[in-house]
Image (cartoon, grey):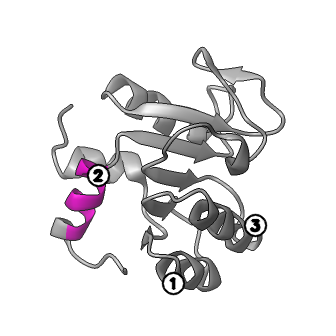
Amino acid sequence: MPVSTDDDLRDIIERSHRIAVVGLSSNPARPSNGVALFLKANGFDIVPVNPNETAVFGAPAVADLGEIEGPVDMVNVFRRPEYCADIAQAAVAIGAGALWLQQGVRNNEAMAIAEAGGLTAVQDRCLRVEVQRLRRRR
């Protein structure tokens, strides 16, 4: 379902506890690192998804979404738009609750795949900014 209001955004954030971060880097200079560190500090369980990492923040990294054991509430994507349709398909395949494309990342095909698969979909928004803006406290 498309997300269009603050209530929609708040709902997706409130029901997301375990977040797979696709493209999460251990490099503190990368935006993915700063956003994921903020989320972790605010009580979210972070699953690093990056074939070039072994672990981030002490959590073992997986190469792709299909390797994650257990449920995933949200897939947060830090990848270029051309990769997002495949990531959306993988998010649907693992039964994630939502697909969130970070600020600057837009892909309408990925949005359509996610929505057709029953996921709530957000694009071109920073999860950290929205959590802070909506006064999310965990």
Give SS at disc 1. Answer: helix
**Which of the labelled discs sits on residue 138, or is there none?**
none
Q: Which amino acid, by three-letter code, is at mark 3?
A: Tyr
Q: Give the main secondary structure, helix, strand or loop, of the magenta stretch.
A: helix
Residue 61: name its quadrant: top right
Residue 5: name its quadrant: bottom left
Q: Which residue is mark 1?
A: 116
Q: Is residue 40 left or right of residue 104?
A: left
Residue range in magenta is: 8-15
Q: Which residue is mark 3?
A: 83
On the image, the x and y values in percent for residue 84 come to 68, 68
Which residue occupies the foreground of this view, 43 or 68?
A: 68
Q: Is residue 136 left or right of residue 41?
A: left
Q: Which amino acid, by three-letter code, is at mark 2?
A: Ile
Q: Which amino acid, by three-letter code, is at mark 1?
A: Ala
Give SS at disc 3. Answer: helix
> CA–CA distance between discs 2 and 3?
24 Å
Dot 3 alpha-carbon crowd within 10 angstroms: few under 14, some 14 to 19, many 20 or more = few
